[in-house]
Image (cartoon, rainbow, N blue to C red):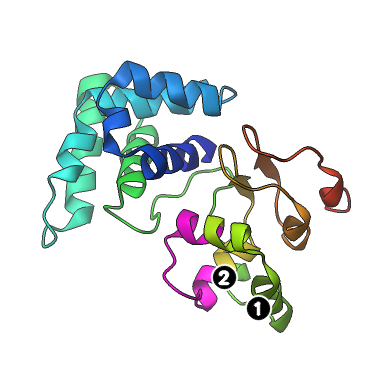
Amino acid sequence: MNNIPRQQLHALITQQGHAVCYDPNQCESRLRELCPEHPREINLLISALKENVMAELLAVSEDTPKDAVLSKLAQRLYNNLGMAPEEAHWAVESWALALGVIETASFTTSQADTTAKPSHSKITAADREWWNRLDYEWKGFFKKTFKIQGEPNDAQLAKQVHLQELSCSNSQISRLEPLSHLTDLQVLTCSHNKIVSLGPLQNLT
């Protein structure tokens, strides 16, 4: 599965609130506008929504073990809809991340996602300098995307520096120069914003 729809769902809820997802048809329409190239993942997210995954995640209390809840909901998708186990876990975890029920992804897919590889868990002085030089727009974007309070710690910064996929669609971002530092970046989605050129990324390999 591709994690761009997961990121777009999080951004959509952050910007417009839970109400945008009360109507599955409206939620599906918005996601198809934001990432039309990923219909499979959108179908999984909307199928989970129709199975009341969002409602049950929002009702989870602070002291409830989150892993148990996510496993129960994934099992429901498997039983009721015939989703493959990895699809069910991905869909439930995507909603949990988007709603802020969990902060980090524990289920990994076979393709690149937004987490850092284990071998890329360390940062360098250049990485910290890159963060310090980021403008207000980019710092705000990364803080919202990774739910960072204040300055990022080393683990949070490593996730940013070693991103393989990133979506900055429907954001206030207007320049891509800061991404030239992200040498692991493979997939970038940047529709519905002020970006007019990919020139700053031409040296990425």
Q: Which residues are magenta?
A: 142-157
Determine the residue located farthest toward the bottom in the rendered image.
125
Q: On the image, numbered disc 2 is attached to which residue?
A: 157
In front: 75, or 174?
174
In depth, the one of 21 and 135 nearer the eye is: 135
Q: Mark 1: which amino acid? A: Arg
In the picture provided, is 185 more to the left or to the right than 49? right
Q: Position of residue 129 (x, y in %)?
A: 70, 78
Is residue 74 rendered magenta in the image? no
Return the x and y of residue 55 as percentages of the image width and height.
Answer: 17, 36
Would you name the residue on which mark 1 appears?
128
**Point 35% across, 49% down: residue:** 97
Q: Nearer the viewer, residue 89 or 22?
A: 22
Rounded to the nearest whole Å, what is the CA distance between mark 1 and mark 2?
A: 8 Å
Looking at the image, is mark 1 or mark 2 earlier in the sequence? 1
Residue 14: x %, y % from top left: 38, 45
Amino acid on which disc 2 is placed: Leu
- What residue is rendered at 78% in x and 56% in y? 177
Which element type, helix, strand or loop, lies under badge 1?
Answer: helix
Name the residue located 73 percent from the left edge and 40 percent from the top edge: 195
Up/down of 198 relative to 35, above or below: below
Cβ atoms under marks 1 and 2 closer than 8 Å? yes
Left/right of residue 53 with respect to residue 183 in the rendered view: left
